[in-house]
Image (tube, rainbow, N blue to C red):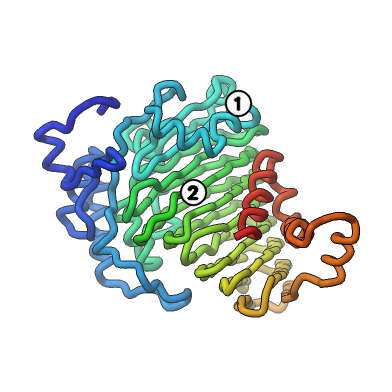
Amino acid sequence: MNDTAKVTDIDRSIYDIRDEENNDYRMSSGLTAEIVEKLSDEKNDPDWMREFRLRSLQIYNELEIPEWGPPLDGLDIDNISTYVRPKSDMKASWEDVPDDIKDTFERLGIPQAERKSLAGVGAQYDSELVYHNVKDSVSKQGVVYTDLESALRGEYADLIKEKFMRLVPPSDHKFAALHGAVWSGGSFVYVPKGVRLDIPLQSYFRLNAKGAGQFEHTLIIVEDDAYLHFIEGCSAPKYNVANLHAGCVELYVGKNATLRYSTIENWSKNMFNLNTKRAVADEGGRVEWVSGSFGSHTSYLYPMTILKGKGSSMEFTGITFAGQGQNLDTGAKVVHSAPDTSSVISTRSISKDGGVSTYRSAVVINKNAKGARASVSCDSLMLDAISRSDTIPAMDIRTGSCAVGHEARIGRISDDEVFYLMSRGMSEEDARALIVSGFADSVSKELPLEYAVEMNNLIRLEMKK
């Protein structure tokens, strides 16, 4: 459907509601088999995907809300639109994107970042990709970067069928099943054997519709001896009703390959962020997670890595900022399933104005993972006396031939440090912001310059609220 096209009689059988304010079309709120089948029709799914969606819906109805995170008060799936189509189909040229959507992404700096430091960009607006582009030099190396739905109907259909929701099966938890039933949009990346893509790829997700959900699926396959840095950005405006993000990320890392996956999430504070991310690494493979979590009312976010091959490794570096009215439950998981594997988890959390930050980790070392090494470090900074920070580590060690360590620290900003900076001419507000930025330096230094600047700006913005 082009920018000015009208909804046809056939389209009206799919879309139940037209939102005049946002000029988009959406299905009725709630989750039924009829809605799932309408979505499958809209996507022109192959038969196996339609069956997958309906089976996921059945699992969703059978499962209970997870008990391991904060309560999800205020989230009612019956009031969430699971599919919202913007007024534009996907474009390969930024100039062809409708002005109102383009203006939103330009304010977020997407085209500038693409020109400066990216090998390819995908931009999703609500439930659909509106822009996708990759440099010719990248394509010539055999790298595939496209929207997942196009790949599902193209030459990589069999590969996607083999890999889709194998790392995160719908039975994993209720929101994984929800994702399996109504997923829409997302990216597919394939890096061939031996290709090192030194310039990052990026996907950006914008949930702009009021009272809607976003359920993008990212599937990345990095073959043996290859390298990729993938960056993910997320944002949404604030509304007075709940929005939901329940995306899914699946990462497959081959022998002696490396995948760095960086995320800066800046959701609004009416957002329930219930995202699931999981990676598996073959022999000598390496997974690097860099995560910055801001905004959202409630988060469940625990990227997981399965170290399947001998000598495989993972590193997770994360920062979370919980302000007033926020309950952010984040962390990381790792399963050592082979000898000589190693993992390093390093997280930092900041809580302010009554915000609640919970670090939740799980380290599993199976009996055949002899020689495994695991290190977990969690530092928390509370900016006042009414905020809260908790650390909930879990370790399941099934071999005596391994080395495992855990360290956790909770503290406050030192008045002496603030006084010292103020004596050098800084205001108290700037002094506190500088100290917090320094606390988050372990994350920002892992990001490309433009994204490190963005993260530091987000921290300063949160400090001023």
Spatial CA distance of label 1 from label 2 is 21 Å
Q: Quadrant of the N terminus?
A: top left
Secondary structure beneath disc 2?
strand
450 or 239: nearer the eye?
A: 239
Q: In this view, does 157 lie above or below 178?
A: above
Q: Earlier in the sequence, mark 1 or mark 2?
A: 1
Residue 98 x/y as whole percent: 37, 28
**Amino acid of disc 1:** Arg
Q: Which residue is drawn at 70% across and 63% down?
A: 346
Q: Mark 1 points at which residue?
A: 115
Question: Which quadrant of the structure image shows residue 62?
Answer: bottom left
Question: Which quadrant of the structure image shows residue 175?
Answer: bottom left
- The 10 Å Cα crowd at callout 2, few under 14, some 14 to 19, many 20 or more, is many
The circle drawn on residue 235 is: 2
- The 10 Å Cα crowd at callout 1, few under 14, some 14 to 19, many 20 or more, is few
Q: Which residue is drawn at 73% across and 68% down?
A: 375
In the image: residue 385, left or right of residue 241? right
In the image: residue 142, left or right of residue 421? left
164 or 238: nearer the eye?
A: 238
Residue 99 x/y as whole percent: 40, 28
Residue 26 x/y as whole percent: 24, 46
Secondary structure beneath disc 1?
helix
444 or 136: nearer the eye?
A: 444
**Amino acid of disc 2:** Ser
